[in-house]
Image: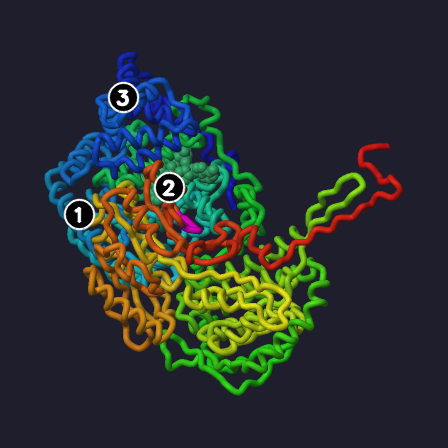
Amino acid sequence: MVTPASLSPYETKTQEIARQLISATREHRSFFAQMRDQMRWDDKMLGWAMSNPGLRVQLFRFIDCLPSLHSKAEIARHLQEYLGNEIVELPGALKALLGFASPDSMPGQIAATTVSTGVEALAHRYIAGETIQQVIKTIERLRKDRMAFTVDLLGEAVITEVEAQSYLNRYLDLLGQLTEASQRWSTVEQIDRADAEDLPRVQASVKLTAFYSQFDPLDEQGSQEKVSDRIRLLLRRAKELGAAIHFDMEQYQYKATILTILKQLLMEEEFRDRADIGITLQAYLRDSIGDLKDLITWAKERGTPVTVRLVKGAYWDQETIKAVQKDWPQPVFNDKEATDANFEAMTRLLLENHNYLYAAIGSHNVRSQSLAIAIAETLNIPRRRFECQVLYGMADKLGKAIADRGHRVRIYCPYGELIPGMSYLIRRLLENTANSSFLRQNLEERPIEELLKAPVMKSSEFSILSSQLADGSQNSELKTHNFSNAPDTDYALSSHRQEVRQALQQVRQQLGKTYLPLVNGEYINTVNYVDSVNPSNPSEVVGQIGLLSVEQADQAIAAAKAAFPGWKRTPAKERADILRRAAELMEQRRQELIAWMVFETGKVVKEADPEVSEAIDFCRYYADEMERLEQGVAYDYPGETNRYHYQPRGVSLIISPWNFPLAIPVGMTVASLVAGNCTLLKPAEVSSVIAAKFTEILIEAGIPPGVFQFVPGKGSTVGSHMVKHPDVHMIIFTGSQEVGCRIYADAAILQPGQKHLKRVIAEMGGKNAIVVDESADLDQAVQGVVQSAFGYSGQKCSACSRVVVLEPIYDVFLARLVEAVRSLNLGPAELPGTKVGPVIDANAQARIREYIEKGKLDSEVALEMPAPEGGYFVGPVIFRDVPPTAVIAQEEIFGPVLAVMRAKTFDEALEIANGTNFALTGGLYSRTPSHIDRAQAEFEVGNLYINRGITGAIVARQPFGGFKLSGVGSKAGGPDYLLQFLEPRTVTENVQRQGFAPIEGAD
Ligand SMILES: Cc1cc2nc3c(=O)[nH]c(=O)nc-3n(C[C@H](O)[C@H](O)[C@H](O)COP(=O)(O)OP(=O)(O)OC[C@H]3O[C@@H](n4cnc5c(N)ncnc54)[C@H](O)[C@@H]3O)c2cc1C
């Protein structure tokens, strides 16, 4: 697929050009220039970052946070917190600068000024201007050097529709102003004309996903419609003005959708003959050469070329981390040389197809550019069809040297303010200081032969492409622990979207069937039935559930008691293997299970999918855990053995909730089963069909009769009867605090004939808070709060229902939060664009509405969205300035209602956050190390999440559960969970006979 570069017919010419270019980039500077450079703090910072990896991390973290700091004292304090850390070894100059006693002192102020001026200087190296006027000046300077430009507007992440519209408006305005300025420019032949054709003088680079705040590959059609409407406006305006538009390429998850959208749009009659539009491809992606081949085929059909900008890709670290975290195949090459080799192969393919596609080669690597130039010159590619591109400030000398050679060079000029520009700046700093970066290696004056060596794709990078990519196992070396979580579905892949669409259709055909209780291995008929309906459309009956009577419940408990001795004797390995088979079956039925959740509980696909992963993980993790515990512990002494081991408790009753209709019942049930207990599962009525599906899976996996039984029934009668039954040993409950406390009390009463005390594990509610301080990254914080508060309509026990915001950023945060929530799509859960679906039933809907009314008594409404008709919908509501003691700030609502609270200090914020009866989850958005430390120590929650959303705990990564009134028991998905289902025993044997016993180690 990739031709080794050494065989390339262009190699000799490439080397020749590269040597010329490299000498131009390594110009020898005068002694005075070097002296002056050494004085500059921006240079010093880059130098330190390159020489000291620990300092590089802390310095970049500090720079990331700097724009949010508003006083010199704050800057000085953060400098010390980030860089004064003992693990960072500081160069002498920096150590001296940071040696101040107090951030308010004069030396503190000096340090703050010195460093922030240095960072500003750094930013100005890579950002072409903060205003349009400044960027026009930069452009005019570039044109004097015979260089063209493309302008990129730096922006915050687009998370609201207001921001998406403003992104478009700002570009329309930019195009207008640049065009107006361009009227004054005299023609520069080298960049304004080619092959007797006038070229657009103005070019803008845009990010397609920024045209729609809810851009989501899962909702390909919805996203396409929204962005295409705005792009058409942009392209029309650009045509009127004679300007060109280039589309950047973004993260991998968007790539396929971006290409699909652009290919379709540019085939529309109105745009089909436009040659002034560009698309970007990233060579660090393993599948990018395939994309290029597809584009060539497409361009042949289209008939008019577009420009392909070829780059290596700007998000390598991010893509790699994401793949590891999600257990997905790494989409980028793992080896820098592989990216280089792929870039060269793509360069060749692109340039050899110059009849169909124009090429823009974007790289700061002398070798990468030289190969492109060698091919262009060898093939005599017409000038219109080829240009070289570099980023502003990254490779000025290279750009100039290529321009001097007569080629068209275009400089990518980002413009905008520093805060929105920060992520861009950090990407450039990372790129500049990475060990593998060409720029750095050239700066360090590595031997030229080494720098210009033809890159070769290692065969291992190819083998990853096949089998390992399929199961993600190539990531294993990057992991630090053994348990492999089941990966969620990557809906960026169209095949997966297709699968879930099909599953939804198929499951819809199966709605309305009857599901009976399973007692002692038989499905039994019942007198009473209840309908489980689709909360998005309650007239749709998902299934009819047979409800167990009290007598039938007694039969089930008797069957469990009878099955217990056999199950207890079954080797742990056999029990564990049944769980592993169940996991396998769930994996096979993943999309179907998702569809059942969508219909029965109104959960959207993106929320239901990780739930299947979690259920699978519970099976595999508890299977492994039981095999570990089964070993027991030997505390042997000479003459005496001491064996510590575990035995099961007996009969367990699982009472599960509807909000995680699969993962929670599966987790509680399989933990009990694998520990050797006979287990009865009583699901919530409204999610019984999903529990019935899990029952089918356990039967298929080989669970023996009586060992597991499916016992749907009325909680208040049958459920309560079973809780009190003398033959039940354990009750494992997840649900409301009220029911949990009742179960706890009932279980404590010793019943006639009962020879044990019952154990209760109860996961109850939460009133979870996220604290946002003034140093927080607001893009992240707003998105994290929106997802945590309104995902699954706020019906997760881990959901955020309070957000405590520090005074200085309160108004800005609230305004963005309100717009972000207003931008969410509400509707039936099965629609791919829906972000907020219905609540579970009419009771919940009424209760939530009551809370909203109560909230209005003491707090101001910042947003109340209308609810769609038909289902059990409640539009998201945000209350502002909520007093910490208000009902809506204290009681669990379990719906899409968020209380925003104001705090003057971080102390007060923590106090408010801790001021409820609950302690389940909590979050902090902050870039202040001392605040992060304090939250770790003082935030009273079972699961604390820092700088991320607070829902979505993963098995064996974030064991889940709380304390205070949030529950009793150890954390699900953690190393202590199974112990609760076991009785530990110690057996001591005196093995001495007549003073004799073997003594280990002695003869
Ligand atoms: C005009 C222009 C426009 C751009 N537009 C975009 C865009 O739309 N989207 C985008 O993503 N980027 C874009 N970029 C940024 C570009 O991706 C980076 O600047 C580029 O990757 C740096 O590569 P290089 O050839 O200059 O340097 P080199 O030093 O030769 O290459 C560095 C690159 O190698 C890759 N790499 C680093 N480590 C590894 C590894 N271990 N394994 C595999 N690969 C590795 C990374 O892509 C890294 O950026 C653009 C750049 C230019 C010049």
Task: Select label 2 or label 3 by which is in front.
Answer: 3
Residue 494 lies left or right of residue 774; in this view the side is: right
Q: Which residue is mark 1?
A: 175
Residue positioned 47% across, 24% down in the render:
449
Residue positioned 64% across, 62% down in the render:
649
N-terminal of the two: label 3 or label 1? 3
Establish whether ligand 1 lies closer than 8 Å to the Cβ of label 2. yes
Q: Bounds of the magenta span?
A: 941-945
Task: Select label 1 or label 2 by which is in front.
Answer: 2
Dot 3, crowdedness within 10 Å: few (<14), some or many (≥20)?
A: some
Q: Percent position (x, y) of residue 564?
A: 68, 68
Q: Amino acid at mark 2?
A: Ala
Q: Percent position (x, y) of residue 131?
A: 16, 39
Any part of residue 957 in sight: yes
Q: Kindly report the distance in space between the C-alpha atoms of the residues bearing marks 2 and 3.
A: 27 Å
Q: Percent position (x, y) of residue 238?
A: 19, 52
Q: Which residue is mark 2?
A: 314
Q: Kindly report the distance in space between the C-alpha atoms of the residues bearing marks 3 and 1.
A: 35 Å
